[in-house]
Image: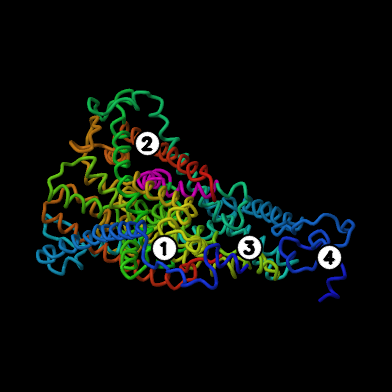
Amino acid sequence: MTGTLSQPSPRPAATSLSSGLQSGQAQPGLGGPGLGQPGADPYGPKRPRPVGARTADDRLALAGSLAGSLGLVFVTYDRLLPFSGPVGFFVCWYLVFMLCYLAVSAMAHPRQVVVDRLLAALIHGAAAVVFGAVLSTIFYTFFRGYHAFLHLNFFTQAMAHTEETAPLSQGGILHAIVGTLIEIGIATCVALPLGIGTAVFITEVSGRFARVVRTVVEAMTAMPDILAGLFIYAVLIVKFHVQFSGFAAAMALSVMMLPIIARSSEVVLRVVPGGLREASLALGASRWRTVWRVVLPTARSGLATALILGIARGIGETAPVLICSGEATYFNANPFVEPMNSLPLFVYQGYESGITEMVLRAWGAASVLLAIILILFVTARILARSRPGRS
Amino acid sequence: MSAAISGPGGQATGPSPRRIFRGLMPADRVFFGVSWSVGTLVLIICGSIGLFLLLQLIPTVRAYGLHFFTQVNWDPYIGQIGVAAALLGTFEVALVAIVVSVPLALLTALYITEYAPQFLKSGLVSLIDLMAAIPSIIYGLWGFFLLTPRAEEVSRWLNTYLGWFPLFKVAGANPRAAVVSMASTYYGSVAIAGVVVAMMVIPMACAVMRGVFAQAPPGEREGALALGATKWGVIRTVVLPFGRGGIIGGTMLGLGRALGETIAVLTVIAVVFDINFRILRSGTITVASLIADRWNEATPGQLSALLAAGFVLFVITMAVNFIAAIFVTRSRSGASTEI
């Protein structure tokens, strides 16, 4: 052991991974004061070996395969082969690229490297598809919705005195915007404390009953949104004669959001290291203080994500709102009386009507919905990060 | 050292050891009480939904008999009410959605945790969360206006060249026909609905998977690298085994969403009550979209039939979840992480 270490290794040692294994003699800079030899290291400053570094060979193989496959597909596709359309072009390009990359890599490298490269290409391709799809959704919505944005009355009027076929210069969606904000606000106030409370109950107060609650909540995450709506409709509206109102819709939304928030918060709380809890308890903190000061702050970022996912599911849900809030074309800020419209409901009705102007308004409302979600989203992200403490 | 342990007040030769208080502190008693009651309340809310739906099944089965489960058509005016077609459609749409979304979600989660450059990482995580935040109605519009024309193109290609494979065959469609007939043949099919639902499954599954992959122990990662593993080697030997629970859990969450998706499906499909195994052929129906489609015009008797259909859907999703929960509790990532 000492014989190998006294001989300097041919390359600078990888300090990030192996510094703990080597003795002070081999690494004078890192050794103790008594062991280290004075003088500069002859192999230059120690840097961690870059794990994911690409060589020129890596880069050229990738670029060459990309360019070669593009050229091949460009020449054959739609000219020699009986295929057409942009979708097919990209699919073919990707398949031919993978074959090229496989061949190029296999010429000079062992199997492990070939597999590594192909899977890297596969993973990058899949990620590109997913991110392309989500960006296309966002931009397409704003692209179709901007016609309605050009009219200021779209944001300041309701549809009460406007014909459906009237041009975009009349009427608007103010009633739907206000309705959505009120409904989601009530729903969040109900679902957030209950959801996180349930997650804390499941993870921190373990026991047989907590396991039962966990199983039921887990199963309930799969509950279709429309069933939550029907449940509230049958209980609140049919049995207790609550009106079709924003409050009933908010209750339906909170019933739907509750298991989602509880389940995703529980997943986050479960991966908080057990050692942190034990350290807090060993220092004499009570169980409550441990939860409040250690477990929840550690999981804060994850809990914010859980809340975002819950609100996101809630704010865009059409089905419970469709059943519980009723349709309203007029402005109504009171959640307890009279029907209340909301953005997803307005979008769905606009699409259903098939009238050109209403479809345009539906796209406009969809853009507003998306913009509200973007704003909420950025706010939640900033809140989750800006507090002091662990990230 | 020994002085620190015995403390300033306690001495080794003291009269008696300090009494240890083993009960709960008042704050903890309140904490346990409150969280116990929250758990009970949530259990009551969730349980009453299942119970309520179950109670609706009884009058329906009494009125329509067991034909309720085998009848294909849903036409209350001629006394035909059944969920066979809707159940089949629900399974087909969910299956297509899972087949499309789970590989994409898994690979995207791996991209974010393992491959993405550091400055992009948090942005991509936000983008995936944002994808979950996009409402289903917007995915429905996206599916109808943007996806459907492209999907019809791909459907036609699949039917033409892979039509020998039963799944891709569309009976009665002439693949060489002019483009005009394409719309009615391939529009609103199971495959299109499945892809739209997949857009909603991906972020849920991906968020769970990424969360677990990011928790993979760095010591084991570095150990694998030190032993000479490639990047994929690290993923295969450390990240994926550690994240198995997250993969199954994410798939489970996604399947739940896929089975119950209502509005997006209703927006893109052509409503047809039919036993149809051709996923590319126009027309299908799912249980959830059946409820949303027929709720408005239902009499009380039909409403309870719709709720009974909802109960069938409810039981299926519960069964799926219980099976998946067994896998998740066995996996390694279910255990608490040690530092």
Subunit under mark 4: A
Query: What is the number of the mark on residue A363?
Result: 2
Q: Which residue is mark 3?
A: A118
Identify the secondary structure beneath mark 2. Answer: helix
- Between the residue at mark 3 and the residue at mark 4, the CA separation in whole angstroms equals 47 Å
Q: Which residues are magenta?
A: B123-146
Type of the residue with mark 1: Phe
Q: Position of residue A110 (x, y in %)?
A: 72, 70
- Between the residue at mark 1 and the residue at mark 4, the CA separation in whole angstroms equals 72 Å
> Callout 1: few (<14), some (14-19), or many (20+) C-alpha neighbours within 10 Å?
many
Q: Nearer the viewer, mark 1 or mark 2?
A: 2
Subunit under mark 1: B
The answer to which of marks 2 and 3 sits earlier in the sequence is 3
Q: Which residue is mark 1?
A: B168
Q: Position of residue A112 (x, y in %)?
A: 68, 69
Type of the residue with mark 4: Leu
Residue at horizontal 16 percent and vertical 68 percent from the top: B67
> Callout 4: few (<14), some (14-19), or many (20+) C-alpha neighbours within 10 Å?
few
